[in-house]
């Protein structure tokens, strides 16, 4: 059996810039994101986007866990901490955030689906790398 390629922990699909990102072109149109936009306007979705960015800085793409303060998010987005608190709580109710451990000043949570989407990405990259290795091996054998 042929060797499987190494893990693609922080490899970009394009080979340039950052690695896997847990969003796709349809992210803004997803029902739960749309519900936050309906209720909190763009700030609703921006909070989730902020959490995804912060998650990559804290967690390095692996688990999707993030710890943040309501005030830090509010200051970053030009909002108010009570609004961010309401958005975080509503996002947890909608299923966008798992395991919300909320305090009066800060919270910890996991972005729902993060790990599963990352595992699908890693598997696609492993398969692609394996196919490329097999092509290169076949070309080398044909030329030998």
Image (cartoon, grey):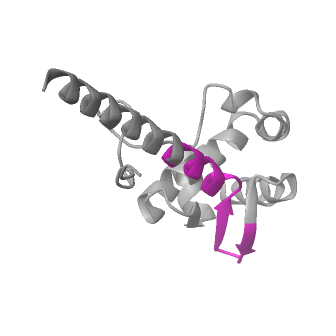
Residue at horizontal 83%, vertical 35%?
31
Q: Which of the 4 image quarters holds residue 25?
A: top right
Horizontal relation, residue 40 to residue 109: left or right: right
- Reply yes or no: does residue 64 show up in magenta: no
**Residue 118 in the image, given as x and y percentages of width and height:** 56, 50
**What x and y, as percent, mark residue 3?**
36, 53
* Residue 105 horizontal/vertical position (percent): 64, 74
Kindly identify the residue that appears in the image at 15 percent across and 22 percent down. Answer: 143
Q: Residue at x 75, y 64 (%)?
A: 98
- Residue lying furthest left in this view? 144
Judge by depth and name the residue closer to the eye, 14 or 100. Answer: 14
**On screen, 28 above or below 43?**
above
Q: Is residue 101 magenta?
A: yes
Q: Does the image show residue 78? A: no
Image: 69 above or below 34 = below
Number of on-image labels: 0
Q: Can residue 65 be seen from the camera position used here?
A: yes
Q: Pick the quarter of the image with the C terminus.
A: top left
- The answer to whether 11 is drawn above or below residue 70 in the figure is above
For residue 33, side relative to residue 67 (left or right) = right
Residue visible at 87% across and 58% down in the picture: 93
- Report whether 43 appears left or right of 131: right
Q: Nearer the viewer, residue 12 or 5?
A: 5
Q: Quadrant of residue 38?
A: top right
Looking at the picture, how far across and down is residue 74, in whole percent? 59, 53
- Horizontal side, residue 72 vs residue 129: left or right: right
Q: Which residues are magenta?
A: 99-122
């Amino acid at each position: 059996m042929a060797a499987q390629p190494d893990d693609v922990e922080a490899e970009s699909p394009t080979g340039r810039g950052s690695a896997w990102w847990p969003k796709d072109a349809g992210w803004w149109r997803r029902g739960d994101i749309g519900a936050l936009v309906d209720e909190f306007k763009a700030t609703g979705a921006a909070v989730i986007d902020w959490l995804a960015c912060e998650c990559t800085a804290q967690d390095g793409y692996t688990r999707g866990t993030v710890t943040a303060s309501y005030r830090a998010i509010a200051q970053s987005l030009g909002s108010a901490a009570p609004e961010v608190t309401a958005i975080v709580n509503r996002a947890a109710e909608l299923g966008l955030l798992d395991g919300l451990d909320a305090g009066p000043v800060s919270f910890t949570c996991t972005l729902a689906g993060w790990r599963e989407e990352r595992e699908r990405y890693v598997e696609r990259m492993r398969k692609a790398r394996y196919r490329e290795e097999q092509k290169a091996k076949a070309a080398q054998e044909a030329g030998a």
